[in-house]
Image (cartoon, rainbow, N blue to C red):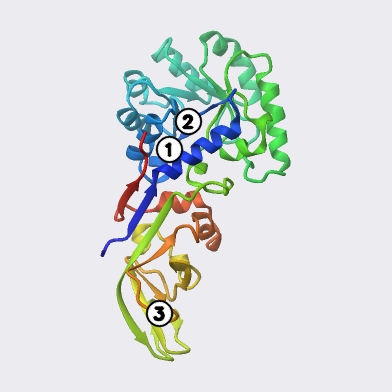
Amino acid sequence: MTTASLRIDLDAILSNWRALDALSGTATQTAAVVKADCYGLGASRIARMLARNGVRTFFVACAEEGATLRQIVGEAPEIFILSGHCAGDTEMIGDLSLTPVLNSAEQMHRHFEALPGAAFGIQLDTGMNRLGFEASDWFAAAPAVLAAGPKLIMSHLACSDEADHPMNRQQLTEFKRMTEGMKVPRSLSATGGILLGSEFHFDLVRPGIGLYAGRPFEAGTPAVTLSLPVIQTREVHPGETVGYSNAWTAETETRVATVAAGYADGLSRRLGNVATLWAGDIPCPVIGKVSMDLITVDITHLDEVPDALDLIGPNQRVDAIGDLIGTIGYEILTSLGHRYQRSYVGGAA
């Protein structure tokens, strides 16, 4: 093997969706957020598997993603577009029966004028100050919106990955205030909100990162393994350096493995001299800088040279890598490039 391997366990993803579905309760529908090509892991396999196993509602970021997803999952599932009905989206939304989540009066007027009678949802801003109607605009628009029959009213939690953060309760209170008495299905929670408890679940929940056991759903089953092939080894003597800028100097006799992956594959240069790869259950430190296509690793303590070393796997999830470089698991996953040899296991109906 000379190409890094990205292994995606479809059975684990389905198990995680089912676990989150069970947490949300029988009265709440569980959708799936599959934006950014299923967080970089491949909508063509993951979304199709989810649809085959009973997921009937999906969320994506934009109409173009919705158009691609429609070809994958077929005509039956509902596909919500979180960015709403933007200029230039009308044909895709209408022809492919996509459901935009309208975020403003401007989008509302565009949708009602261009596609009268077509399905839509509404997003409310309950404090995140990103997308959605603010309270005053919403209450002015609500009579016309409710008369047109929205499929869903939703909002988004800003701090749900921190269970005790006061913003969660503030947004819950505001969402209830802004939707009180409206006989429309409601949705407030993605993965983190599901874990906050039933008061946050309403009629529909929208797990995304939790499908891959990303934080905060650390109780989930790991679904991703990233293995980097060893393509050369060498002995480095005390005082010799490794890689660009002489960023690592050997203090003792060191066996160095060079693996085939780098920042062109979405692995941050900041992982140099701080990250760990794994030979089974044995940690192996990255030494020197991460290059465009190569990473160097200290394997002195191994009894034999492995065929490959794992960056992501059961011993090190994506969030642990993110912690090393001050980011989150979402960014690690969505940054993974297209040079990996991707393989999918499981996923039978």
Q: Is residue 189 at all visible to an observer of this figure?
A: no
**How packed is label 3: few (under 14 Cα within 10 Å), some, or many (20 or more)?**
few
Q: Amino acid at mark 3?
A: Asp
Q: Which one is earlier in the sequence, the residue at label 2 or at label 1?
A: 1
Residue at numbered disc 1? 35
Q: What SS does tag 1 mark? A: helix
Q: Residue furthest left?
A: 2
In percent of width and height, residue 252 lies at 46, 89
Q: Which one is earlier in the sequence, the residue at label 2 or at label 3?
A: 2
Q: Nearer the viewer, residue 317 or 15?
A: 15
In percent of width and height, residue 308 lies at 35, 67
Q: Amino acid at mark 1?
A: Lys
Q: Is residue 159 above or below residue 310?
A: above
Between marks 2 and 1 in the image, the one whose residue lies nearer the viewer: 1
In percent of width and height, residue 94 lies at 35, 18
Q: Is residue 244 above or below residue 222?
A: below
Give the spatial CA distance, label 2 vs label 1.
9 Å
Residue at numbered disc 2? 82
In percent of width and height, residue 112 lies at 45, 13
Going by the image, does 92 lie left or right of 181? left
Q: Is residue 33 at all visible to an observer of this figure?
A: yes
Q: To which quarter of the image does residue 77 belong? A: top left
